[in-house]
Amino acid sequence: MHRKSRLPSEDQLPGEDALVALLVRGLPQSERTVAGPGDDCAVVRIEGSGMLQLLKADAVVEGVHFTREMAAAGVGRKALARAVSDIASMGGRPCEALVTLVLPPEVPLSWVRGLYGGLRGAARQWGVGLAGGETSSAPRGAPVVVSVALSGEVLEGELVRRGGAQVGDVLAVTGRLGNSFASGRHLTFAPRLEEGRWLAQHFRPRAMMDLSDGLAADLPRLAAASGVGWRLEVARIPRRAGATAAQALGEGEDYELLAAFPENAWAELEVAWRRRFPRLGLRRIGTVAKRGVEEPVLAGGWDHFGGRP
């Protein structure tokens, strides 16, 4: 389903991480900004409050994240769920969303109504207010685009960011990875909202992010933000039924949580987690190592611009 860009070699877009780094360099920030580009969400201080505001923008594009043959309600649900998953990874709760819809003229009204039915249902499920948005036309034959801008909030003492992992920490993931597209889970997944908030309140991770581009792409991002390396035990990665180890590492669209915890808290956390979330696993998959240690070296994961295999 994913499509890679094909541009002349002299003007080829770099990989996604390199492109983002280029685009955000020198962006102006307000005095209220706690965290700008580089985390799952931007973080803004709310003056006179112990709360921080989380800001997330995300988009699903036909031919990249879904096809027109898929259930429209599932596409709408996914569009919001992706952004909610990022709020969850920072220990927050979602608040209001703005939805921008870009449509070519041949899209049936029934499909659009189904899309918004999925958005409404998801918003009710996760307590999100659909506060407004925008619509735009596109040329005939162009892909449908659904863009969501989502706000959230988190207590300042419960905020979890990608940076902060320390050498010796336990690396762990929720749920199972791989086989998301073939199984259809990418349309039906549940953002780990309750789980992320519980962790932030009771066993605050040193670092956490959601897994959207695959463990092989996202673990190096968490490590880079923390200034550390990793020792990953590939055999311990929990896989969804029918998933290969390669899919669990690199397919993406898992929307589980990847987190780093102090080693001395892990045994207590395991027991408390099983008691609180008996139907969802939290599996240790490795440890945080010093910077430069990459065992194994990871390649793959989804990259919108084809910068990785």
Image: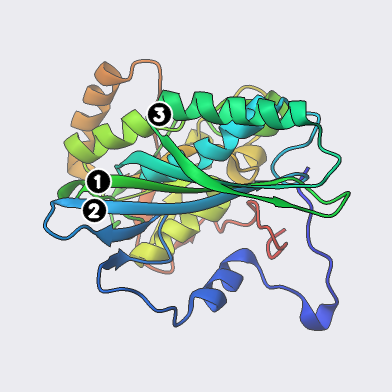
Q: Secondary structure at mark 1?
A: strand
The image quadrant that residue 274 belongs to is top left
Q: Residue at x 45, y 43 (%)?
A: 97
The kind of residue on which mark 3 rests is Trp
Could you classify mark 2 by the number of other residues whose Cα lies within 10 Å: few (under 14), some (14-19), or many (20 or more)?
many
Residue 180: % across, % down = 64, 32
Left or right of 226 in this view: 134:
right
Ranked by sequence position, the earlier of labels 3 and 2 is 2
The image quadrant that residue 270 belongs to is top left
Compared with 108, 143 (above or below) is below
Q: How many marks?
A: 3
Tell me, yes or no, whether the two marked residues, 1 and 2, touch with CB atoms within 8 Å: yes
The kind of residue on which mark 1 rests is Val
Q: Is 96 in front, or is 268?
A: 96
Q: Is residue 7 visible?
A: yes
Give the Cα distance between marks 3 and 1: 15 Å
Residue 71: % across, % down = 72, 25
Q: Would you name the residue on which mark 2 appears? A: 52
Ranked by sequence position, the earlier of labels 3 and 1 is 3
Q: Secondary structure at mark 3?
A: helix
Q: Would you name the residue on which mark 1 appears? A: 154
Q: Would you name the residue on which mark 3 appears? A: 126
